[in-house]
Image: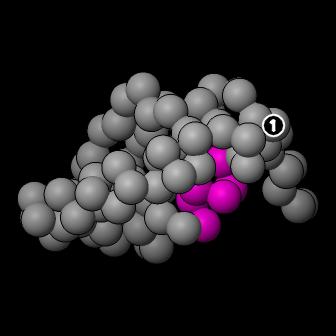
């Protein structure tokens, strides 16, 4: 059964989760997390996306994002 496409309308609030394949680690240490946050901090203003919260675990991360004019997909593709 195909996945239902997400609503990617500018201005919507999204709970976004990223996870490692087969639940493998995506962050080995704090340096990995810092690198990810640095990339995110550059892309948020570029895509006019607002980040209200995040949570990092070893094999996944959660974000609460309000999408900009280009939508959430534009941010996530570049991240």
In x, y percent, where is residue 58?
23, 57
Q: Nearer the viewer, residue 63 or 39?
A: 39
Q: Nearer the viewer, residue 65 or 59?
A: 65
Q: Which residues are magenta?
A: 72-77
Q: How busy is the neighbourhood of tag 1: few (under 14 within 10 Å), some, or many (20 plus)?
A: some
In this rendering, the count of numbered labels is 1
Toward the left, the furthest residue is 30
- At x 35%, y 61%, the residue is 39
In x, y percent, where is residue 52?
42, 26
Residue 31 left/right relative to 70: left
Residue 77 left/right relative to 35: right
- At x 88%, y 61%, the residue is 2
Residue 52 left/right relative to 77: left
- At x 46%, y 73%, the residue is 21
- At x 10%, y 59%, the residue is 30
Q: Which residue is label 1 attached to?
A: 9
Q: Is residue 73 one of those drawn in magenta?
A: yes
The overriding secondary structure of the stretch rendered in magenta is helix
Residue 17 appears in the rendering: no
In x, y percent, where is residue 3?
83, 56
Residue 51 appears in the rendering: yes
Classify the position of the N terminus by image quarter.
bottom right
Tell me the colour scheme of the image.
one colour
Residue 3 against residue 35 in the figure, above or below = above
Q: Is residue 32 one of those drawn in magenta?
A: no
Q: Quadrant of residue 68?
A: top right
Toward the front, the furthest residue is 46
The secondary element bearing badge 1 is classed as loop
Q: Quadrant of residue 51?
A: top left
């Amino acid at each position: 059964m195909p996945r239902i496409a997400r609503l990617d309308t500018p201005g919507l609030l999204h709970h976004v989760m990223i996870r490692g394949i087969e639940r493998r680690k995506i962050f080995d240490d704090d340096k990995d997390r810092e690198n990810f946050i640095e990339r995110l901090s550059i892309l948020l203003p570029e895509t006019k996306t607002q980040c209200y919260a995040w949570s990092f675990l070893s094999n996944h991360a959660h974000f609460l994002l309000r999408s900009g004019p280009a939508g959430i997909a534009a941010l996530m593709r570049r991240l």
